[in-house]
Structure formats: C-alpha cells, structure tokens
Image: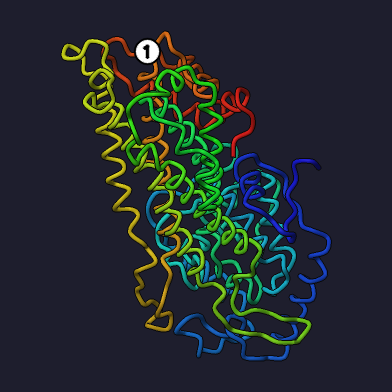
Amino acid sequence: MKNEVEVGGKLQISDVVRVARERAHVRLAEAAKPKIAASRAYVEQLVAGNQTVYGLTTGFGKLANIRIAQQDLQALQRNLLLSHAFGTGELLSTEVVRAMLLLRAQSLAWGFSGVRQTVIDLLISCLNKGVHPQVPSQGSVGASGDLAPLAHMSLLLIGEGKAEYQGEWLDAHEALRRAGLKPIVLEAKEGLALINGTQAMTGIGSLVVHDAQLLATVADIAGAMTLEALKGTLRAFDAKVSQVRPHIGAVQVSDNVRRIGANSPIHQSHANCEKVQDPYSLRCIPQVHGASRDALKHVAEVLEREIYSVTDNPLIFANEQEVISAGNFHGQPVALAMDYSKLAISELANISERRTAFLQDSSLSGLPPFLAQSGGLHSGLMITQYTAASLVSENKVLAHPASADSIPTSANQEDHVSMGTIAARQAGMILENAKTVIAIELLNAAQALEFHKPLEPGPGAKAAWRTIRERVPFADTDRIMTGDLAAVKELMASGKLRGNVEKAVGSLH
C-alpha cells in the first residue's frame, strides 16, 4: 500500500505524523517476526526453568526482591497495568495517542522485549481500526518509562479502561468488540514491556518538532513581510554574510528572506536612504531564526534515534541467551532535547513580537500609530501586540527546563528521573503560543503594507499579503479581530500561506 508505515523498520518523524494524523495503514515487517518469536521463546524458557528474572518472575521497582509464583504470572502483568494507570489531567489528543501506539509497537518489534507477536498485532490493529484508548496527559516523571500514560494506553489491550471508536467513548471491551477485535491475556513480561518506554514523550515530541520546523519557515515569511513594511534593507541577508559564519540555519533563512523580498518596489524605493542599519529584530533574523532551525534539526535527530530504539527493561538477548537489566527506559535524551526545543520555539516568538511592536510604534516605523487609518477614534491593531507580549511572557515561564528537576520515586529505588514528558508537553504549549504570535505579526505586516500603496512588495511578500487578504480585509475601522487571527492561523496550518509564497518564489527551506 502506498500510504503504509512498516513497524520494525527505521521509522522517521514523518512516518509518525502520517500514522498519527493521516491514519496511514500500519503493518509489521516480515523481517521482525522471527526476532520476536525467538525473544519470546527465550522468555518462556526462563519461566519454564523457574528462573528468577526481574519483571518476569518478580515484583517491580522496590518490590523486585519478591518472587512471584508460576500460577500468578498472568495476574502479575495484569495487576501492573491496573495499578499503574493512575494518570490525571486533560486527555492526550487522539493524534498523540496514535503516535504512542505506533511507537510502542515499533519498540517491541525489534525483538528485545520478549513479548508475543499477538501483543504487537493488537497494537497495530487498534491503529488500523481506529480504536483509541483514553490517556490522561499528566503523571509521568519520564523514567522507568512513561509508566502512567503507557499503562492507560495498554489497558485497551486487556479490555479495560475507556476508548474512543468512531467518535464515541466506550468501555474498552466494547470498543474492541465493535471494531472486530478481542482483548488478550498478558503473559510473563508483557505488561512490563508495554509500559517501560519513552513513547509518550517521544510521540508528543515528534509531532511538536515536525510542526515547529514548518513554523520556522512561516516565521521567515512573516519577517520578510515586516522587513518590507518597515523599509528595512536586504543587505544583511546577502549570501556573503552567512558565508563567513556558515551556520546552516542562517544560510537557509537568509536565502528565504532574499527570495521573498526580491524585486520589491518597496525595497527599491529606499535603496539610497540615509539609514545605516536596522534594529536587531530585522537585521538578525538569519542569526535568530537560523539558530532555532539548527536546534530543531538536532532535536529531530535525537527523536528519530529514540524512535529507532528499544526502551524496555529488562532487555532480552535471545541469541546470547541473556537478560540484562539496564536503563534504556530513562527519558533523559528526549528530556534534554525537548527542553532545547522549548528555547528554540520560544525565540521564534520572542523576535516576532519585537517586530510587531516595531510595526506599531510610529516613532520608529514611520507608519500610522498602531497601524490605524484614523488613530484616536480607532485603536487599530494596538491590542494585538499586548496579546503577543502576554504569550511570549508565558513562554518564558514554560521554557524553564523540566529536566533540571528530579524527584525520587519507588521508595528511592528509582532515584533520578527525567521529567521528559513534562518537557514535551510544555514544548507543545510553547508551540501553540508561538503560532499565535507569528500569526499576529502576519496580521500587522499585512496591515502595514497597505500604507505603502501604490508601491507593492516583492512577489513573495505580495503572495503572502494576497493570501491573507482573501480571508482578512484591511482594518480601516475598529472591529473584533479574533476571527481574523483564527483565519491567519488556519492559513498557516493548512500550508496555504507557504504554498502560495512558494508558487511565487520557488521552494523555501
């Protein structure tokens, strides 16, 4: 199938997005099946031999020294899910839950977790049939895996908890039945294998970083429009500048802004003006936007390594006949990366808000105060900058590194944790705020360009302006503008704004 994703291969963030949002069909790679079978056979050998192995024949965490009788091994795994499904807060979105189901199946499919193929098959079937467990967003400390979120996710497999099917919340058993599926009875190791991992933080993080990288290009479009509206210079975006400080992101941003602003009558109108250089929020767009791009690229690389990883404990090495208890469930790599992404996304919003403020300040911009056609009687776009300022200030609080904190759990057995899922969730909040801040800049830049008529912006900025004007008319009088903001955000989310600019100037980075 063309729109198909194969579990047990090298998945990328784009594959996670396709499954989470586009409902791409998922299947288990044929090459994975023998490894899964061998891993399970070794687990069954250990159980049959009455071996003492953590998580197979013992309790969990601080209770690892308690031996479990053979006849209680199924109950042990079921009890683990029931007891650990203790999350709270708002529910994770369907797309995040789908990402979690996919990534959990992916980790198990490598054949180092000792689960039966039946477990992986049911995870995949839930994705393909659209059965989505109810998963609260809070409760993970990001080590020993995303225990609470993954336990809630995994309840579905045993017919417990709640699940959504075809738009209706149902008891999980009923949701499975309607989808033509049946719950399973977990065997030794399988409950633990389902909840030991970083799939909540990685699922959230993958979707956030994917969207943030798209937002970075929209930020370039907004910055280029503002540069024209403020009669800034393109000289700072000359390719020679980035050649002597060749950070990849800065090179890409400079190229984007140059092409968006190329052949602009507005730019040409002030080619020989007396201004020497622009304020940093204009002149340093390549350096600031570019640094955020480079940071997000690094975060994406970390997440794709995590997607390709086995995050279970203990690990089952069937070929070597060995079980190793280790720490692959610890979320620190993802936690640090997601905290880094928080800073990168916040900075796109920070510099955007400064450009909006510049557009509204007539003493600096040469434009009407607050971009109002009849200032005084009308306030124009004044309050839009207040909202942007509020959001960037909120982002500064959210950007505090979650991974800087650690609280011991499980009676000090699990004495250092990552808080990676908190970092990922906060990154998502920052991203939503940043989208709004950049949409506010686009609203202001489109309004400001009107005051340069009959001069027009360059083809790229003009395409963006026209796209916005299809949905948002010029504000010649005061009006409720929340609908205008929503319209611009929809143009950003749909890709129409970027797409129309690219039709005018070619593909953007």
As drawn, 455 above or below 404:
above
Amino acid carrying mark 1 in the image? Phe
Disc 1 crowd rating (10 Å Cα; few below 14, some 14-19, many 20+) is few
The residue closer to the viewer here, 414 or 189, is: 414
Residue 309: x, y in percent?
64, 67
Measured as percent of width and height from the top left, residue 412 is found at 38, 83
Specify the quadrant that holds the N terminus. top right
Name above or below for residue 331 compared with residue 424. below
Q: State the image coordinates of residue 188 (x, y, percent, origin top left).
A: 65, 77
Determine whether, in the image, residue 201 is placed left or right of residue 15: left
Residue 358 can be seen, yes or no: yes
Q: Quadrant of the C terminus?
A: top right
The picture quadrant where one finds residue 196 is bottom right
Q: Return the residue nearer the eye: 489 or 465.
A: 465
Give the residue drawn at x 27%, y 45%: 393
Q: Is residue 171 visible?
A: no
| Left or right: where 330 falls relative to 419 | right
Residue on which the image places disc 1? 474
Residue shown at 54%/72% (left/top)?
329
Residue 236: which quarter of the image?
Answer: top left
Q: Is residue 38 above or below residue 66?
A: above
Which one is in front, 79 or 196? 196
Give the answer, above or below, for where 209 lies relative to 144: above
